[in-house]
Amino acid sequence: MSRFAVRAAAVAGAAAAIAACTPQRPRAPEPPPAPPAAAAPAQPKPRPCTAAAAGSPLVGTWYATASQSGIKGRLHILLVLEQDGSMRQTQRVASGRDIRSELRESGCWEASGGTLATRVTVSNGEPVDGEAAIYRNMYRVEKSGGSELAYREMRAGAPRIAARRMPAGYRLP
């Protein structure tokens, strides 16, 4: 064995002996296990929809376009009011072929005395609290019947929406 190998073995042995004699610091205690994750708060179960009156002229698929001040492009609205009281609404802002934004909501609707009320329970695929004011809308129905529906949100300065009846299954262009 070479002198270098003998020396290296001696140094390694001495280092091991010194390490064995050196007092070791006590280990810090392990942190306690994390408590189980709390379950996400359950969304309130939405109230069921109330069926519309038989023969209601509001039942159907309605399409409208409108301009809004301060918004570049046209607002396209597709409102589907089902006989069972459920509704779906898609609002899209588009400029030419460019879609700037889109909102898809579903929930329930009711009508009485010239008033249309909607309650959104799902917005862009996420369940929401349909009882919150932001998800409840009231409209004054100005004209309904045949192939036309004209309505206006019940707030100051709300624009009139003039929609036309479309075939069932119609989708926004």
Image (tube, rainbow, N blue to C red):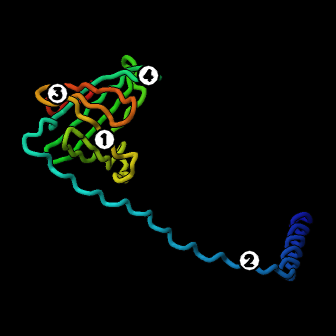
Say which amino acid is labelled 3.
Met
N-terminal of the pair, mark 4 or mark 2, is 2
**What type is the residue that disc 4 sits on?**
Ser
**SS at mark 2 in the image:** loop
What residue is pinned by disc 2?
A: 28
Question: Nearer the N terminus, badge 1 or badge 4?
Answer: 4
Against 148, is 7 above or below? below
Measure the alpha-carbon separation of dots 2 and 1. 63 Å
Q: Secondary structure at mark 4?
A: loop
The crowding category of the residue bearing disc 2, from other C-alpha atoms within 10 Å (few below 14, some 14 to 19, many at least 20), is: few
Residue visible at 11% across and 39% down? 56
Query: Rounded to the nearest whole Å, what is the CA distance between mark 4 and mark 3?
Result: 27 Å
Mark 3 and mark 2 in contact (Cβ < 8 Å)? Answer: no
Mark 2 / mark 3, whichever is N-terminal: 2
Describe residue 4's horizontal placement relative to residue 92 as left or right: right
The three-letter code of the residue at mark 2 reads Ala
Specify the quadrant that holds the C terminus: top left
Q: In whole angstroms, how far apart are the C-alphas of marks 2 and 3?
A: 72 Å
N-term mark: 4 or 3? 4
**In the foreground, 87 or 157:** 157
The residue labelled by disc 4 is 69
